[in-house]
Image (cartoon, rainbow, N blue to C red):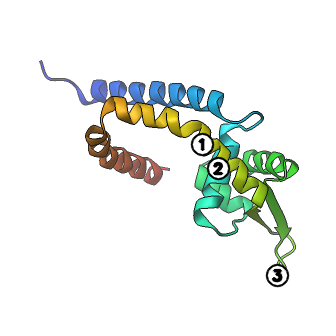
Amino acid sequence: MAEKTEDLAIALFGELFMADQLARNRLTKALPKGMELSHFGVLNHLARIQEERTPAQLARSFHVTRGAMTNTLAKLEWAGHIHIRPDWDDARRKFVAISPSGRAARDAAVQAIAPLIGEVVQALGADRVRAVLPVLRELRTKLEGAE
């Protein structure tokens, strides 16, 4: 009996949702005290791109509302992990940059979670992980285009 496309899709997304929940749970527990996964995501993004971003650009990048991003940025600013400055050409707009403290916090978080992620890759096997990455990237691209 042939497997229906809908059944296959439900199985795929069921596994993705469960893996996402388990990964978030493990990573959250490993992050330095007071750091949330959303904080790490923003700090990691800013550290990688090495450029300022507006809160709206960050919200789009993370597929969250502007309000949710504003909340995350307020917590990161309070902790001294980011600098928020006005746009000198348009006072209604702001720019966000990672601070030296934020870079250090991001690096500490990477040190804390790297062993967990490494264990998973080692258990699965690097070749299998490399093989599945293109499929996951294509899935992400399709889902981003479906909005």
Q: In this view of the protein, can residue 91 be seen by the observer?
A: yes
How far across and how far down the image is residue 1, in percent?
12, 18
- 43 lies left or right of 34: left
**Residue at (70% x, 68% y) in the render:** 52
In the rendered structure, find residue 139 and report the number of the disc placed on it. none
What's the amino acid at mark 1? Gln
Q: Residue furthest top?
A: 1
What's the amino acid at mark 3? Asp
Alpha carbon separation for disc pair 1 and 3: 39 Å
* Label 3 secondary element: loop
Contact, mark 2 vs mark 1 (Cβ under 8 Å): yes
**Residue 68 in which image quadrant:** top right
Q: In this view of the protein, can residue 64 be seen by the observer?
A: no
How far across and how far down the image is residue 80, in percent?
84, 53
- 4 lies left or right of 32: left
Q: Name the residue under label 1.
A: 111
For the residues carrying marks 2 and 3, which lies nearer the camera in this image? Answer: 2
Q: Which of 70 and 133 is in front in this view?
A: 133
Q: Which of 32 and 95 is in front in this view?
A: 32
Q: Name the residue under label 2.
A: 107
Q: Is residue 94 above or below residue 125?
A: below
Q: Is residue 29 above or below residue 49?
A: above
**Residue 16 in which image quadrant:** top left
Q: Name the residue under label 3.
A: 89
